[in-house]
Image (cartoon, rainbow, N blue to C red):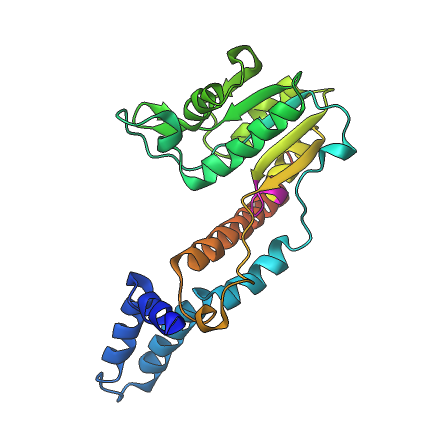
């Protein structure tokens, strides 16, 4: 009964419910134009599939399956910890940590963890923003509230994307042992951009996802988190393709 309740509850969530309703409506649409009708079903079923934990897990394993978390035991010294910016939701009535999205929080927590392991390292927080707030500023204040000294924190609030972050931070990182903190789906592209600026970095991926432990009864029901993860991976693949195209056109571009 518990699993039945969970399955019904999952099906009543906005994403799967919308897809089910659309499929139901498709049954009443005239089938005289077979091409558009078949294409519509293809789009619906593809969206359903990409939203399931089962398919998302296979995509995760293809994209980040070989990645591992940063292992401090393999690095005796780290001089700079760079945390790249992510989502934020500015609201002056809330504390800084509550204005950071899950992605930004995951990256910052990993950065603070490493800052505690390497007490002499500087913590660089980066990222643009809006609404009079930046990822860099919110992360800096959150790090301070978690016990990191203000003197150790450096902000880079003007970088609008990862390429900007790499270009702006590179001059500050030359000849230092640098660890780069960002999401697992983002780490390869970010590392590529920093290395293109001549900065060798140690990767510290975070925000890993794993749907393997989901019960079989829920593996094939669309889930907003699964679709979000697939969307992020797709975003990174497009970003990597764009870098390749830019470098073919202009090797000095990125």
Residue 4 appears in which quarter of the rendering?
A: bottom left
Q: Residue at x 49, y 68 (%)?
A: 215
Residue 73 appears in which quarter of the rendering?
A: top right
Q: Quadrant of the N terminus?
A: bottom left
Position in image of residue 253 (x %, y %):
59, 35
Give the vertical position of 45 relative to 234 (above or below): below
* Residue nearer the viewer, 180 or 43: 180
Give the vertical position of 149 relative to 163 (above or below): above
Q: Residue at x 59, y 30 (%)?
A: 113
User: Does residue 158 appear in the picture of this structure?
Assistant: no
Give the vertical position of 53 relative to 84 (above or below): below
Position in image of residue 177 (x %, y %):
72, 24
Total numbered labels placed on residues in the image? 0
Q: Which residues are magenta?
A: 183-188
* Residue nearer the viewer, 173 or 144: 144
Position in image of residue 63 (x %, y %):
61, 55
Specify whether 14 is left or right of 212.
Answer: left
The answer to if 185 sits in the magenta stretch is yes
The answer to if 93 sits in the magenta stretch is no
Q: Residue at x 67, y 22 (%)?
A: 118
* Residue nearer the viewer, 202 or 99: 99
Position in image of residue 66 (x %, y %):
69, 53
Q: Residue at x 36, y 32 (%)?
A: 98
Query: Looking at the image, which residue sits at the far bottom?
Result: 32
């Amino acid at each position: 009964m518990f699993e039945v309740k969970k399955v019904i509850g999952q099906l009543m969530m906005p994403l799967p419910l919308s897809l089910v309703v659309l499929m139901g409506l498709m049954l009443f649409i005239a089938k005289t134009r077979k091409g558009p009708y078949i294409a519509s079903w293809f789009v619906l079923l593809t969206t359903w599939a990409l939203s399931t934990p089962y398919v998302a897990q296979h995509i995760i394993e293809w994209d980040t399956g070989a990645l591992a978390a940063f292992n401090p035991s393999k690095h005796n010294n780290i001089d700079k910890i760079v945390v790249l910016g992510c989502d934020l939701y500015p609201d002056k009535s809330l504390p800084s940590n509550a204005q950071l999205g899950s992605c930004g929080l995951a990256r910052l927590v990993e950065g603070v963890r490493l800052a505690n392991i390497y007490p002499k390292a500087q913590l660089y927080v980066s990222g643009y923003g809006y609404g009079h707030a930046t990822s860099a500023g919110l992360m800096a204040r959150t790090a301070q509230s978690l016990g990191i000294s203000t003197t150790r924190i450096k902000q880079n609030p003007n970088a609008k994307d990862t390429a900007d972050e790499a270009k702006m931070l590179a001059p500050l990182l030359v000849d230092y042992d640098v660890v780069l903190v960002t999401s697992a789906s983002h780490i390869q592209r970010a590392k590529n951009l920093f290395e293109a600026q001549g900065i060798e970095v140690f990767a510290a991926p975070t925000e890993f996802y794993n749907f393997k432990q989901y019960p079989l009864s829920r593996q094939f029901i669309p889930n907003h988190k699964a679709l979000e993860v697939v969307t992020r991976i797709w975003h990174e693949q497009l970003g990597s393709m764009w870098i390749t195209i830019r470098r073919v056109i202009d090797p000095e571009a990125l």
